[in-house]
Image (spheres, rainbow, N blue to C red):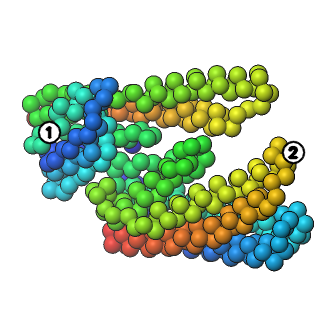
Amino acid sequence: MTDARPVRDIASLGRWGIRLLVFQAVLSAIALATALAHGPGFTEDSVAYGFVALLQLLLFLVAGIVVLRWIWVATANAQAFGAEGLPCGPWLAVGSYFIPLVNLAMPFQAMRAVWKASIEPRDWEVAAAPALLGWWWFFWLTGNIAGIAAFRLSDTGRYGDIGSVPGTLTMSSDALTIFASLLLAIIVRRLTAMQQARASFA
Amino acid sequence: MATSIVDGTVEEAITGRSRGGVTLFKSIRFKLDDGSSRTIIKSAVKQNVAEEITPGAKGRFYLYNAFDLKGVHGVRTPDGRAIYGFPGNNRKLFLILGVINVLWVGFKVAVDGEVPLLGAAVFILAVVGWILMGKGERDAQQQFEGDAGYGGAGGV
């Protein structure tokens, strides 16, 4: 049997996570607008785009730490509600983002399980999860794939000059990140509310 | 790694394919002794344990969750029988995957002078998977052996 664990307060962490994710979406929209305004060659020539990209990187790191901490607490809370047999404990739910290939599916499975367990902890596998989770994961994966492809293809020494492809992929990544960030913000808001309601009910 | 115990009765067990001494259940629904239900979907169960998971079977069921695999690894029945079996096939697969990829990475470094990203990624996955599956198996065995009093104590 699972030991009794305390339910942790997730509200404050959730609020910060939502703010940072919305800020990330806004910054991605600014990056996209800057790139479109500059036109081809924005990654090399535009000082404004370079500045926004630097801010994006810094915000990604800060938001990443806060959201990963939120995921840890949300998973621990799901266990504290009595959910047994979750695919990931709190550490693996966070660590799965850093394991190659596993990070293509396990973070999504972990988030879906925590959502289900927050609805019906005792028999969580039969609870329904909304399509929202699947859409978030789709935009997160495609945005990352586009970003990584843009980064690698911009190495002209290896891949030669392939024209506007890296720039187009960078803009695609920014556009997809807007949706991924906003959808994750909605997930954080709804899941935080569900866990708070269950904690106060208990 | 998560292990848990279900005291109750199997209400429904839908089996999928069986291969390599392991039965994959599409779902198993238990009626717990406290009146609630618990369902596990897509579970891997060793053949000797799977034979005990039939509708109406009553007892204590031991559940595991090891990295990418979950299922039932043990059963104790009210008449004192104890059945244990952990499907270790995936751990062997991770080991084979790790060995193949370390050879592949070594070959590419020797020939091309650079580390292939996919090979390195699969190697890391294999190492993590092998370690976590091993830990899951040890936890499952410890849980089962540490709860040996169920049948002898008079059961449910």
Residue at image position (70%, 75%) is A29
The subunit carrying tag 2 is A
Label 2 environment density (alpha carbons within 10 Å; few <14, some 14–19, many ≥20): few
Residue B120, x across and y down, in percent = 66, 34
Q: Which label sits in the foreground, 2 or 1?
A: 2
Image quadrant containing the N terminus of chain A: top left
Residue at image position (78%, 75%) is A36
Q: Whole-Å distance between the Cαs marked 2 and 1?
A: 62 Å
Q: Is residue B103 above or below residue A91?
A: above
The subunit carrying tag 1 is B
User: Which kind of residue does numbered mark 1 sit on?
Assistant: Thr
Residue B80, x across and y down, in percent = 13, 29
Please state if B135 lies on the left or on the right of A160 as rendered: left
Q: Is residue A13 above or below residue A1?
A: below
Which label was assigned to residue A114?
none
User: Which kind of residue does numbered mark 2 sit on?
Assistant: Gly
The residue lying toward the viewer, choosing from A151 and A88, is A151
Residue A148, x across and y down, in percent = 70, 53
The residue lying toward the viewer, choosing from A156 and A70, is A156
Residue at image position (32%, 25%) is B20
Q: Secondary structure at mark 2?
A: helix
The residue lying toward the viewer, choosing from B22 and A159, is A159
Q: Quadrant of residue B112?
A: top right
Task: Please name the residue that numbered disc 1 is placed on.
Answer: B54
Total residue callouts: 2
